[in-house]
Image: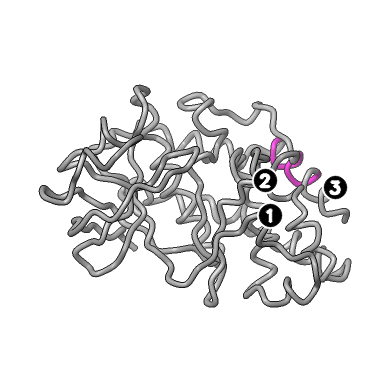
């Protein structure tokens, strides 16, 4: 399915984060979008928008709740440079951003929000999806979600009544530190990731050993079979203005399918979940 393309109608706010600082716009389709663009001097940073598109497509294919996305073009009259901080230099009228559709009535997961009681976890729409997302992050080497900050873990995860909400993937494939040269032999670890967090550790306690084993076996198998269909046409979803290198998808495919690396992913996941 081709990605939607929309124009902005009204500027709402720039969200202050330690990452991309997305800008919230009301768009012509009547929806709110969190929009990301390059924010530093490194022109290769635009690849991170492609990572977002790729990972969104994977999660859709893997049947994990994730918001709809769009290519959002900033329209003249909806841009206010004096109200921007991180995005002031590169976000201009005519720029095409990566946009993630807002999920109404969603709640940002923080350490303060998490209640370790079993009753709290049972209120979550789909606990299996949380485990799958943790596995997915190891597979794609998302180095941001679950990272320990001074204010607690950076879960980059919203929960809503209709499913697990907004997921952020700009730091997949090693993130900004490995732009244009990530490869299967790069070291990676489960520490300081979602799978090692109390959120996932407490979540796994609600499943029997056999249930957890089936979740892991089925999902890892599906990850491998998803690569070809997902990557076959995802390049068409990138904005031509991003100038994404033509070899990106081949490098992603090699990275995700490399047998030695995938074996390490498998072992790391099972060790982290104690199965």
Quadrant housing the N terminus: bottom left
Q: Position of residue 81 (x, y in %)?
A: 21, 38
Label 1 Cα neighbours within 10 Å, binned few <14 / some 14-19 / many ≥20: some
Query: CB atoms at circles 1 and 2 under 8 Å apart?
Result: yes
Q: In front here: 34 or 236?
A: 34
Looking at the image, which is closer to me, 112 or 33? Answer: 112
3D distance between C-alphas at marks 3 and 1: 23 Å
> Is label 3 in a helix, a strand or a loop?
helix
Q: Is residue 101 left or right of residue 114?
A: left
Q: Is residue 155 magenta?
A: no
Main secondary-structure element of the magenta-colored stretch: helix
Which of the labelled discs sits on residue 271, or is there none? 3
Give the magenta range: 261-267
Q: Quadrant of the C terminus?
A: bottom right
- Which residue, given by chain and number where applicable, does mark 1 sit on? 111
Residue 212: numbered disc: none
Spatial CA distance of label 2 from label 3 is 24 Å
Residue labelled with disc 2: 152
Compared to 266, does 28 lie above or below? below
Image coordinates of residue 242 in percent, x first then y, are: 28, 36
Residue drawn at point x = 39 percent, y = 30 percent = 45
Question: Of label 3 and label 1, which has the lower sequence position?
Answer: 1
Mark 1 or 2, nearer chain start: 1
Task: Pick the residue in front: 200 or 69.
Answer: 200
Q: Residues within 10 Å of mark 3 (few under 14, many from 20)?
A: few
Q: Label 1, secondary structure: give it.
A: loop
Distance from label 1 to label 2 (Cα)? 6 Å
Are the residues at dot 3 and dot 1 in contact (C-beta closer than 8 Å)?
Answer: no
**Could you say where residue 184 lies in the image, as x and y percent from the top left?**
63, 31
Q: Is residue 15 above or below residue 179?
A: below
């Amino acid at each position: 399915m081709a990605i939607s393309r929309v124009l902005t109608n009204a500027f709402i706010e720039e969200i202050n984060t330690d990452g991309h600082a997305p800008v919230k716009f009301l768009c012509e389709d009547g929806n709110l979008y969190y929009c990301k663009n390059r924010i530093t001097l490194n022109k290769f940073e635009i690849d991170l928008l492609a990572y977002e598109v790729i990972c969104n497509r994977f999660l859709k294919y893997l049947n994990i709740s994730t918001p709809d996305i769009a290519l959002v073009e900033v329209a003249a009259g909806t841009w206010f440079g004096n109200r921007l901080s991180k995005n002031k230099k590169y976000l201009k009228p005519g720029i095409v951003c990566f946009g993630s559709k807002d999920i109404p009535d969603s709640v940002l997961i923080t350490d303060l929000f998490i209640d370790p009681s079993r009753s709290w976890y049972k209120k979550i729409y789909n606990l299996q999806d949380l485990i799958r997302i943790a596995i997915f992050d190891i597979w794609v080497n998302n180095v941001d979600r679950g990272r320990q900050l001074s204010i607690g873990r950076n879960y980059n995860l919203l929960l809503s009544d209709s499913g697990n909400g907004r997921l952020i993937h700009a730091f997949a494939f090693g993130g900004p530190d490995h732009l244009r040269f990530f490869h299967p032999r790069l070291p990676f670890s489960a520490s300081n990731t979602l799978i090692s967090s109390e959120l996932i550790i407490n979540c796994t306690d609600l499943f029997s050993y056999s249930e957890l084993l089936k979740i892991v076996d089925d999902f890892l198998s599906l990850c491998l079979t998803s690569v070809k269909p997902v990557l076959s046409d995802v390049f068409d979803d990138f904005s031509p203005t991003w100038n994404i290198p033509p070899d990106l998808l081949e490098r992603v495919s090699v990275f995700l399918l490399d047998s030695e690396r995938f074996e390490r992913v498998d072992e790391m996941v099972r060790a982290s979940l104690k199965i």
